[in-house]
Image (cartoon, rainbow, N blue to C red):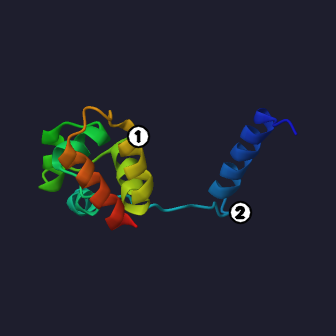
Amino acid sequence: MKRDIGKEILRGLEEIAEWKQGKKALRTTELNLPKAADVKDIRDSLNLSQESFAGFLGVSLGTLRGWEQQRREPQGPARALLLVAAKQPRAVLAAFSAAAPSRARSRSARSSERSARKAAA
């Protein structure tokens, strides 16, 4: 069945008007996204070094350290990725392993990844 985006938008605007008039309660969802205080525990649970975890998250090592020392709070997509890392560590470890070039990984990095997979199991 083909969607009618125009009708969906108009229905959404009608719902907002009803909510403003007190005629309708809107459904809400609250997410508890990770904060700076959670970052070190998340990284430790994955058994990754600061350097590896920062690289995986796409942030500088200084930024990761700032979060772990609670001097700064993660923002935007980083918080979402931290949520995935906290709730679905196997998925993060699989992505981390798939993203790492096989020849460039050291023996200790492979060992750390195996340990992290065992810990997440």
User: Within 10 angstroms of label 1, few (less than 14), some, or many (20 or more) residues?
Assistant: few
Identify the residue position indicated by label 1 in the image: 98
Mark positioned earlier in the residue sequence (1 or 2) = 2
What amino acid is labelled 2 in the image? Lys
Identify the residue position indicated by label 2 in the image: 23
User: Within 10 angstroms of label 2, few (less than 14), some, or many (20 or more) residues?
Assistant: few
Residue 41 on image: x %, y %: 24, 63
Q: Is residue 76 visible?
A: no
What amino acid is labelled 1 in the image? Ala
Residue 33 on image: x %, y %: 38, 58
What number of labels is visible? Answer: 2
Q: Residue furthest right?
A: 1
Residue 29 on image: x %, y %: 54, 61
Of 90 and 35, which appears nearest the observer? 90
What residue is shown at x 26% (from left), y 62% (from top)?
38
What residue is shown at x 81% (from left), y 37% (from top)?
3
Determine whether the residue tagged by mark 1 lies in a helix, strand or loop. Answer: helix
Q: Is residue 88 above or below residue 6?
A: below
Of 101 and 37, which appears nearest the observer? 101
Q: Is residue 20 visible?
A: yes
Determine whether the residue tagged by mark 2 lies in a helix, strand or loop. Answer: loop
Q: Is residue 87 above or below residue 64?
A: below
What residue is shown at x 33% (from left), y 37% (from top)?
100
